[in-house]
Amino acid sequence: MATIDYEQKIPNNVDLKSDKKLQRALEKWQPDYIDWWRDMGPTDFNENEVFLRTAVSVDRDGWAQFEYVRMPEYRWGIFLQPDDSERTIPFGDHMGEPAWQQVPGEYRNMLRRIIVTQGDTEPASVEQQRLLGLTAPSLYDLRNLFQVNVEEGRHLWAMVYLLHGFFGRDGREEADELLERRSGNPDHPRILGTFNEPCRDWLSFFCFTTYTDRDGKFQLLALAESGFDPLARTCRFMLTEEAHHMFVGQTGIGRVIERTCQLMNEHPDRDVKELGGIPLDIVQRYINFWSSSSNDLFGGEISSNAANFFGTGLKGRANEAKLNLDHKALEEIYSMEVWEDGRLSSRDVPLRNAMNEVLRDEYVNDNEKGIIYFNKIVERHNIDFRFSLPHRRFNRRIGMYSEGLFDLQGNPIDQATWERDKNALLPSREDREHVASLMKPCHEQGKIAGWIAPPQKGIDGKPFEYEYVKL
Ligand SMILES: [Fe+2]
Ligand SMILES: [Fe+2]
């Protein structure tokens, strides 16, 4: 079961060849996917060989193999964690019943919506990042970008398999639409806000992979608990790939900070901007933007949808089955600060209705750890600057806090204060222009752009100087 059948047109470990109808449907979708990749995937580099990892097994150890591949020839496929026939639904009203191997009829629409919403984010991120190869700071970074891109493409495959395999005709229609919406297109946008935000420079890319991919991690953790077993199993394998995306983001921001600190120490009386670096306060504002936008992806604080997703057993809490919790979550309450009539007060909410907030709590905790990592870098360089994570109320577009204005500590502020301070809180036009001015490609083997430090090590035991992309 764990071995992937690479003999097939669509590599898979779900014995696709024994389901001819499904196989035919997916093989019909495959060329449309490749067309989408050529239109909306990375520009210009489709003929180049890239040192990519490909999944060859779903075993925890040795699941990936590294080799040179042209991106359109990447073996996108369908890989599920092996099935555990004993598995029961770990939470909600159906707790203890055998996990569903087919879509439970009464929850069909809700489940389809969950899968489509997750699926839509995958191609969206590829679209957002499509031009970044042109300005990569090194071959190592170029390769990492493409690794993330092909794996997001595979995540789309993961969701499309579920739509085709379990939802019949409307599933096939949804799969087609996943290739039709476009990130940032005003007439036909992607479903969620952050996935329509432009990602024009590499600092945005590193923030995206840190904060937005980490949202992805928590959504996948919650869906990996699903009572719908094929969804749980596909999300488990996606999580294995996802870890690298956040690594790219976290170490990417870290390397920008590292380089800026070096420049500050080498030239204490000069402006980092003139030295071709990215000032730390600009990095902080990019963090403020992407982390706050990604906070929105968890949805409203008090949510009947969240309660339904949990009650029906479709979407749990992160690591639900492993944790010692009341898995029905019927009696407990969650105390949160609510924003009502222009002021903050505290309210007790039935726990099920607060499940978005519960997941966001975990996410915020993880983000805080990332900030500690950034601050260790500035401390190491004896620089008097500390990063911080903006409060979850800051700069929201979704949920109750979107009704107010808040500073980075989460205190309410008025419109005049917001207008006065916003260029210190979020990336200003000048900030973006400065970052954009540094975005010149450094595609020479072994070289790196001046605004970022090289990584501590390369990929798959190779040195930084390795020819990660053959240009
Ligand atoms: Fe993904
Ligand atoms: Fe990702």
Image: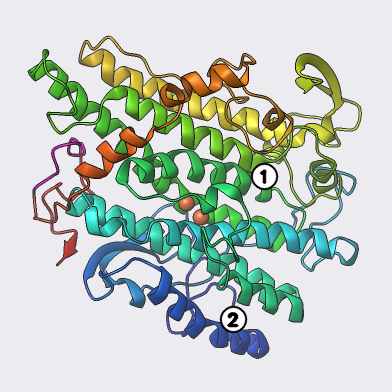
Closer mark to the observer between disc 1 and disc 2: 1
Q: In the image, is residue 345 above or below residue 19? A: above
Residue drawn at x 52%, y 65% as measured from the top left: 2
Disc on res. 222: 1
Apparent side of residue 184 relative to residue 384 in the rendered image (left or right)? right
Q: Residue at x 72, y 59 (%)?
A: 229
Q: Residue at x 17, y 50 (%)?
A: 440
Given the image, on which type of amino acid does mark 2 rest? Leu
Residue 449 among those drawn in magenta = yes
Bin the neighbour count of mark 1 within 10 Å (Cα to Cα): few under 14, some 14-19, many 20 and up. Answer: many
Secondary structure of the residue carrying tag 1 is helix
212, above or below 369, in the image = below
Which numbered disc covers residue 16? 2
Judge left or right: residue 229 versus residue 137: right
* Residue at horizontal 19 percent and vertical 58 percent from the top: 468
Q: Is residue 383 above or below residue 466?
A: above
The answer to whether any part of residue 85 appears in the image is no
Q: CA distance from mark 1 to mark 2?
A: 26 Å
